[in-house]
Image (spheres, grey):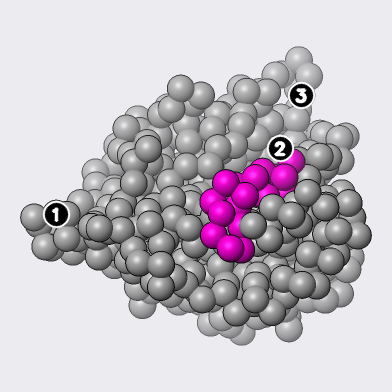
Amino acid sequence: MSTTTASGGGSPSDHFETPMLDKESPALLHTICEHGGYAYVSMAALAASGDIRAAEAAREMAWEQLHSGPWHSVLPVWRDAYSMACLHVARHHYCNGEFKEALRALDMGIIMGGPLLRKDLDSAIEKVSEKAWCVRVSERSNQDFGNSEHPLVDHEFDVSKVLQLLPVKSLSSKLVVKRSSLSLEKFLQDHYLSGSPVIISDCMSHWPAKAKWNNMDYLLRVAGDRTVPVEVGKNYICADWKQELITFSEFLERIKSHGCSPGGPTYLAQHPLFDQIHELRKDILIPDYCFTGGGELRSLNAWFGPAGTVTPLHHDPHHNILAQVVGKKYIRLYSASLSDELFPYSETMLCNSSQVDLDDVDESKFPKVQDLEFVDCILEEGEMLYIPPKWWHYVRSLTTSLSVSFWWSSEDESSAAS
């Protein structure tokens, strides 16, 4: 096991504080007992006194409960129980100077756990990350690590080669309208109210992310030891598609090797990365457009992957600003009025996705699809694309790409969408 360890380990008194865990443990353990978790409670009591085997056993018990059925049917108390066990495991690793292992346990508590102990998880991650970074720097002779320039994306781009990879008729019909520094009033009148897509340029130059995210060393410094969920395979509709939990540094290694893994391309897609890694959240700003119509932000997600990753044709329930921070993407959009012609899946889980594979259209099943009207574009670095609710869109990364999606809606719209 690869471990970032402080020389000599940590002292028993060197630990992170868990005020929420200390406060909520009695009530949480009582509730777990009420739901039959007697064995868990016994292990948790031993874990609290420093027994790492008991902590691991408690975490495994909670993990089994999280996977006992569909995610929506999991009792919330077991998600909080999982977070509790993760904190106990992380504390043990931290005291031993095993910072990578501590961070993995804490990240798993965030990804799979409940909200009750989130403040403890966040504060512990901040402390452990700082320790891990100090050790990493001390082990390297290059003291400028994290400040050098190792770009993720070089800016050479052959459009003719790209066109060969895109769906039939791409960039040959109607392009998405592009506006520079679009005012809120014009956005409201010309696009929000009419439900009309638009590319907005010159609105991201002040984002720290624009200067930082194309630097491999910066990303390693702020997120290298963190655990993130990734998708592996062509896309979520394919039978061989799967999800994995890997460190961000391993993910970056796959990006450098063109995103390849034994199971196919690796994509960090639609993940609330900024709730998990606060340093990256500081690098972006919520566009003012996201408050149009008295709306509230509903979701803030990261999309990060190599060239060739594809999000198949689908629609979303909210207004969407897709901000292209690093790299380029091809995007094709169909009006919400064409839903029937795009043959949505009948299954509930995929009802917002089309059966039409734009990369390989089955003309015997969908003979009229190629004649449907659409707009498309290459979304350039530093541009934002507004996608109205229910508009169908297909997305292909043309280079290594880092994007951020901002979903927003008003209360009335959210109620109607649900």
Cα distance, mark 3 to mark 2? 11 Å
- Mark 1 Cα shell of 10 Å, populated few (<14), some (14-19), many (≥20): few
Q: CA distance from mark 3 to mark 1?
A: 58 Å
Q: Secondary structure at mark 2?
A: loop
For label 3, the residue is 366
In the displayed structure image, the side of residue 214 where residue 375 appears, left or right: right
Magenta highlight range: 47-64
Q: Could you tell me which quadrant the N terminus lies in?
A: top left
Of the numbered discs 3 and 2, the one sitting upstream in the chain is: 3
Q: Indicate which label's residue lies in the foreground, 3 or 2.
A: 3
Residue 343 position by quadrant: top right
What secondary structure is found at the residue carrying circle 3? loop
Residue highlighted by disc 1 = 140
Looking at the picture, which amino acid does disc 2 mark? Leu
Q: How packed is label 3: few (under 14 Cα within 10 Å), some, or many (20 or more)?
A: some
Taking the spot 53% from the left edge, 70% from the top edge, the residue there is 122
The amino acid type found where label 3 is placed reads Phe
| Earlier sequence position, callout 1 versus callout 2 | 1
Q: Amino acid at mark 1?
A: Arg
Disc 3 to disc 2: CB gap under 8 Å: no
